[in-house]
Image (cartoon, rainbow, N blue to C red):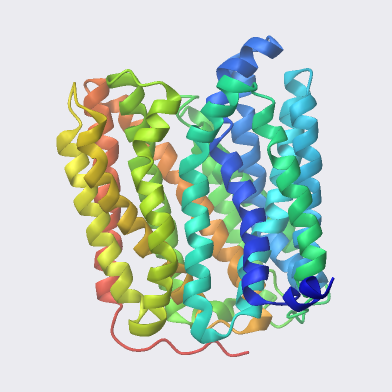
Amino acid sequence: MPKTTKLRGNPWAVLVTLSLGFFMTLLDMTIVNIAIPDVMSDLHTGLDQVMWTVSGYTLVLAALLVTAARLGDMKGQRTLFAAGVAVFTAASVVCGLAGGAEVLVAARLVQGLGAALLTPQTMALVMAVFPAERRGTALGVWGSVAGVATLSGPTLGGLLVSTVGWRWVFFVNVPIGLLVLVLTFLLVPDLRTGRAHRLDLSGVLLSTAALTCVTFALMEGDRYSWNAGILVLGAAGLVLAALFLRQQSRRQGSEPLVPFRLFADRGFTVMTALVGAIGAALIAAVLPLGLYFQQQLGFSAVQAGLALAPSPLVSLFVSPLAGRLSDRIGGRRVLSAGLVSFCAGLLAVILLAQGSASALVFTVPLMFMGLGTGCMIAPLSTEAMRHVPAPLAGAASGVNNTVRQLGSVLGSAAATALMAAGATPLAGIHLAMALAVVLLGLAGTALLATRAGRPAAVPA
């Protein structure tokens, strides 16, 4: 055991463990999509019910991130991370063994709970174990895992479904989860960085209700044709969000769920807003492109995933380098370069995406998009968390991840609506990808408008 003892608390060993857990949760957001037809056939159920295997997971994850982050501050990030991994892994077993759609959907909801428990702890623990001058590189690795997991889901899912069956889309999590659980207790130190002792229950109820209403309305709006019920639900979510902010303003002196001190740091505020905008843009770019490969060019899901592969592969290699560069020359410069690279690649893709095309012509533009993604993810995380003190790292991670999740949901909803609004399917795909260009342009403008001055550190 000497080697294990030596690795215990080693920042890079901790990062590998956290990244593996984080990888599972993000992979499961996209890997299940490809299995839906097989699930419907095997479980003899309809599309509406099976779609909740996707929607339910995302809904629970988005609604509970802030609460889970605060629980990590109270009980310790390692404890909540391990609990999340255990819940997620056990739920994966139940998903794989499910004999009916009801059991599968219920297990997916529990999976979402496990993902919510572990996700905000990853960034908080990275902040705790890495010194400030190395966090850019570490968060670059963490970010590359996020990008690769999200984009590789359809490819890996297609391979599993076509070879060993849809149940292995869930069973594949089990060995990874067990490994992560063992490594967590062997390598990750039990750091108690928070100072909170009580959970703000009224804040938990208001935030959960607000996020549930808003997320459900965004995810299901297109399916229900944005009828009165969906609009009322979305409006109710916004009202509840306003009530939550008012309730939190009154609790700032007594352990609030979201400490407003975080927003005294302009860097955290701006970068967290950009996380949402860029998250929406990435989904609005990749979702229609994947459909273009399948619907317009006649690719299978696996072929479409392989055609998209240049982007995540380049991002995987670039993200750690971008994080290191952010530590040396400043994250805003790297982020600006990433915005330009991604937009250039995406504009080329829009021009090339016609009624007939070869997958090879998209390789270089997709590599530019991957370069852009790699240069955006690391600086976003690094600059957002750079001046956040350790006691607030959990809360900051919860807010940051919640905004990222809501951005992805909003991007997916907007892209779906635009694709349906196009005069032809191809025109709708072009409209959705154009939205991504607009969002990234707005993000770049906001970045330029706020570049002056060094953000002050958040008071501890």
- Which residue appears at 68% of the width and 50% of the height? 115
Query: What percent of the width, then of the height, locates residue 333?
Result: 29, 75
Horizontal relation, residue 424 to residue 78: left or right: left
Q: State which quarter of the image contains the C terminus.
A: bottom right
The number of discs equals 0
Would you say residue 395 is visible in this rendering? no
- Which residue appears at 58% of the width and 77% of the height? 260
- Which residue appears at 49% of the width and 86% of the height? 133
Q: Can you name the residue that lies furthest to the left here?
A: 351
Would you say residue 368 is visible in this rendering? yes
Query: What percent of the width, then of the height, locates residue 134?
Result: 51, 81
Using the rendered view, name the quadrant where residue 286 is placed. Answer: top left
Query: What percent of the width, then of the height, locates residue 117?
Result: 73, 56
Q: State which quarter of the image contains the N terminus.
A: bottom right
Horizontal relation, residue 124 to residue 325: left or right: right
Between residues 242 and 20, which one lies in front from this camera angle?
Answer: 20
Using the rendered view, name the quadrant where residue 168 is placed. Answer: top right
Horizontal relation, residue 447 to residue 154: left or right: left
Using the rendered view, name the quadrant where residue 110 is placed. Answer: top right
Between residues 410 and 298, which one lies in front from this camera angle?
Answer: 298
Q: Looking at the picture, does residue 451 appear above or below residue 39?
A: below
Q: Looking at the picture, does residue 70 appear above or below residue 316?
A: below
Query: What percent of the width, then of the height, locates residue 212?
Result: 63, 45
- Which residue appears at 56% of the width and 52% of the height? 239
Between residues 161 and 417, which one lies in front from this camera angle?
Answer: 161
